[in-house]
Amino acid sequence: MPNQQAVVNFWNCETLGTVELLKASYKSRRFPPHLHEEFCIGIMERGKADLNYRGTYYPVSEGSVIILHCGEVHSNESVEGAYKMLYLKANSVERIISELVDRERGIPFIERPIFNDVKLYQLIQQLHKSLDCGSIKTQQEILIRNTFSFLFSKYADPHVTHPSFDLEHKAVKQVKEYINSFYFWNISLDEVSKLTHLSPFYLSRVFRKELGLSIHAYLIQVRIHRAKNLLSAGCSASDVAAQTGFVDNSHLTRHFKRLVGVTPRQYIQEKNT
C-alpha cells in the first residue's frame, strides 16, 4: 500500500546519552520486519496500527502505549494516524534501572508491547514534550526516571532472563557479531557458515528461527543503523552509501526509506531543523 501524506520528524536530545525522538503521521504506511538496537517507548496519539511482535499480532489504537525491546524483530502491518517514539540506547536504560534498584542489572523484560494505561501514556507524553522543547536537563532526567520507574515496576518481569548458550545460539551470536563488525563488506552466506561450522542451509534456518529475520535482512538492518549514525554526524548520503556497503546512493535510499520511512536526504533535513 503506498505511503500518502507522510509527515516524519527525527531529532536528537543529549540527555542520558543520545535519545532520538520521532514524531510521525501517516495516511497509510507499512513497515517490513525490522529491529531497533535501541529500547523504544512511545504513544499512539490518533488513528490505529497493527503490530506483529514476537510472533503475535497486536492492535494499536489511539491512547495506546508502545514498548519495544532492543533487538526484537517486529513489523507494522499498517499505520494510519500519528504517533511519537523515544529511542534510548540500551546502556542508558540499564543505567536508569541500576539507579532505580541501587544495583547492577540488565533491562527487565516486558512481554507485551502494547498497553492501555492512561498514567503511563501521560508520563511518556510529558517526557517527549520536555525533551522536544529543551526543558532544564534536571527536569528531563526526573521525567525519564519517573517514566521508567512506573513502567518497569508495573509491567516488567522482575527476573532478567538470559538466553541459552547452546550450539545454535552461539552460532547466531557469532554471525551477528561478525556482521556488526564487517557490515561494510559484501558478506556471503558461505562465509558466515564457515565461521560457525554449520551448513549454509541449516545456519539460515537457525538464524531465522531465533531472530525472525534472514541473515541478509539482518545485515541490511545493521547497515541502515550505521547509516543513520553517519548521517547524524554530518556525512553526505553518497559517502554513507560507500561506507556502509551499499552499491550506490539509490541502493541506500531504497532500503533506508523502506525501513526508516523517509529518505536519507529527508532524514538529514529533519535532523537539521
Image (cartoon, helix red, strand yellow):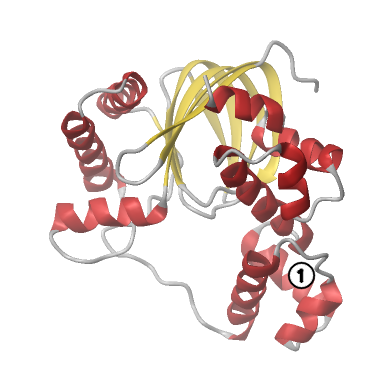
Percent of width and height locating residue 158: 26, 59
Q: How many marks?
A: 1
Q: Name the residue under label 1.
A: 205
Residue 67 higher or lower than 246, as above or below: above
What residue is at 61 percent from the left and 86 percent from the top? 167
What residue is at 26 percent from the left and 55 percent from the top? 95
Left or right: residue 77 compared with residue 13: right
What residue is at 74 percent from the left and 35 percent from the top? 258
Q: In this orientation, which residue lies closer to the viewer: 21 or 156?
A: 21
Percent of width and height locating residue 73: 60, 51
Left or right: residue 157 compared with residue 20: left
Q: In this orientation, which residue lies closer to the viewer: 49 or 133?
A: 133
Percent of width and height locating residue 118: 29, 22
Q: In this orientation, which residue lies closer to the viewer: 77 or 3?
A: 3
Around disc 1, counting alpha carbons within 10 Å, would you say few (fewer than 14), some (14 to 19), or many (20 or more)? some
Amino acid type for the residue under numbered disc 1: Arg
What residue is at 21 percent from the left and 41 percent from the top? 145
